[in-house]
Image: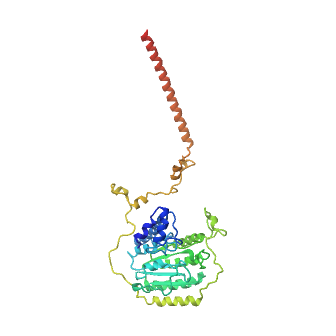
Amino acid sequence: MITDDFVEPLEINKPETKSILLETQINVGEDCPVFDGLFEFCQLSAGGSAAGAVKLNRQQTDIAVNWAGGLHHAKKSEASGFCYVNDIVLAILELLKYHQRVLYIDIDIHHGDGVEEAFYTTDRVMTVSFHKYGEYFPGTGDLRDIGAGKGKYYAVNFPLRDGIDDESYEQIFKPVMSKVMEMYQPSAVVLQCGSDSLSGDRLGCFNLTIRGHAKCVEYIKSFNLPLLMLGGGGYTIRNVARCWTYETAVALDTEIPDELPYNDYFEYFGPDFKLHISPSNMTNQNTQEYLDKIKQRLFENLRMLPHAPGVQMQAIPEDAVPDDPVDEDKEDPDKRLSIRATDKRIVCEEEFSDSEDEGEGGRRNVASHKKGGKRPRLEEEKKEGEEKKADVKEEEKTKDSNSEKTDSKSVKTEQSSSA
C-alpha cells in the first residue's frame, strides 16, 4: 500500500513549503516535478485504476481502461520517474480480493520496477516486463531478477536493446506470454500500455509502430480474461494520442479509419494527418541469436514454476468503491457529507451547453461572476423592461395628479373655514 507519510506531503497547498518538503521526504524533484493540482491528479489516476478493478471484480465489464494510470515507477514511500502514486499496485491489490492469481504485463520501454518490487516475494502476482535494459532508467529488470521467497520465478524480465521493430517484438511477445498463461493460469490481467516504446518517442529508443504495439493488446485480449488496460509513458504527445485511440478501438473490436477527422487539435498531427505512423530506419540491435537466447532462458525459468499456485480461502475485504450510490436524502443531516458525496456535486463549467434562450453571452459562470460580468439581455427582456418602466412612470404621474387634487381641495377647505 502507500504510507501516510508519503500521502500527506502531497496534500500541502503552500507552494513555498511544498517543494522543499517533497524533495526531502519523498524523492520528488527533477524527474518528479511539483505542480499545481498534483494531489488531484494522483487522486484521479489512482482512483480510476482502483475503480476499474472494482468494475472487473463485480463483473460489470470485461475490459476496463484508465489511460491516466500506469505509473509503474512509484514506490511505497517515494515518487520516481514521473510517477507519484503507483495506481497499478493499488488496482492489483483490489483484484486480489476476488482473484487468486493476477498477471501484470508491461510493454512500456522502461522496466516496471515499482510493480515488480511490490510483489517480488509473492506468488499471487506474476510480473512480466519487456523493456530497454542497460544504461537506461531505472536500471533494473535484469534477466536474473526472478523474484524471491515465495515469489521466486514469478518475476519475468525480457531485457531488450535499441531499435526493436514490430516483427521482432511479436516474435518474442507471443511465445513468452503463451507460456506464462499456460504455467500461471491467471484469472485477471493488468496490461500497462506505455507508448514510449513507439518509434520516434522523445525519450524512447524502440522502433515499434502503433499497429505493432496494439498487437500485444489484441493478443492478450484473445485469452478472454478480465483485463485492466492502463496508460504509462509516452513523450511524443501526438503519437500517445494516436496509440491509445487505436488501442481503445482494438479493445472494442472496432475498425477506425486511418484518416483523422477534423478537430480542434488537427494541426498537431501534420503533415500527414494520419492515425498510424511509419517506423524509422534505425538499426535493430536485437539480433535473432540474442532474442532466442533470452527467450530460452525465460522458458527454463517458467518450467520451474509449480503449476498454478492456489490460495487459502478467506473473507473478502470491502471494495475500494462503495457498492451503493450516495443518496444525500438518506444521509444524516447532522453529519458532514463525505468527500465522495461532495465530489459528485462538482460540475465542470462546460458540462452543459447554452440554450438559444440564454442569449449571446450564455449563463453566468464562475469566471464571469468573479469578473462582475453580466449576461446580455434578450430583445424580449428589453421590451419587458421598457414596458415596466412605462407602467411605473404612469403610476407616478397618476400619484402626482392625485396628490395635486388633494392639495387643492385642502386649500379650498381652509379658505371656506376662515370665511
One can see residue 363 in this view: no
- Is 418 left or right of 111, judged from the image as shown? left
Name the image quarter holding residue 265. Answer: bottom right
Report how many numbered discs are placed on residues in the image.
0
**Between residues 10 and 311, which one lies in front from this camera angle?**
10
Most distant residue in the right direction: 271
Which quarter of the rendering shows the N terminus? bottom left
Of 105 and 415, which appears nearest the observer? 415
Q: What coloring was used for the rendering? A: rainbow
> Who is closer to the viewer here, 6 or 143?
6
Q: Position of residue 39 (x, y in %)?
A: 47, 65
Q: Position of residue 266 (x, y in %)?
A: 62, 64
> What is the quadrant of the C terminus in the image?
top left
Can residue 16 be seen by looking at this rendering? Answer: yes
Estimate the x, y position of residue 32 in percent, counting from the top left: 52, 71
Q: Residue at x 62, y 75 (%)?
A: 200
Q: Is residue 34 above or below residue 285?
A: above
Residue 109: x and y in percent read 55, 78
Q: Residue at x 33, y 81 (%)?
A: 312
* Residue at left offset 41%, top offset 84%: 151
- Outermost top residue: 419
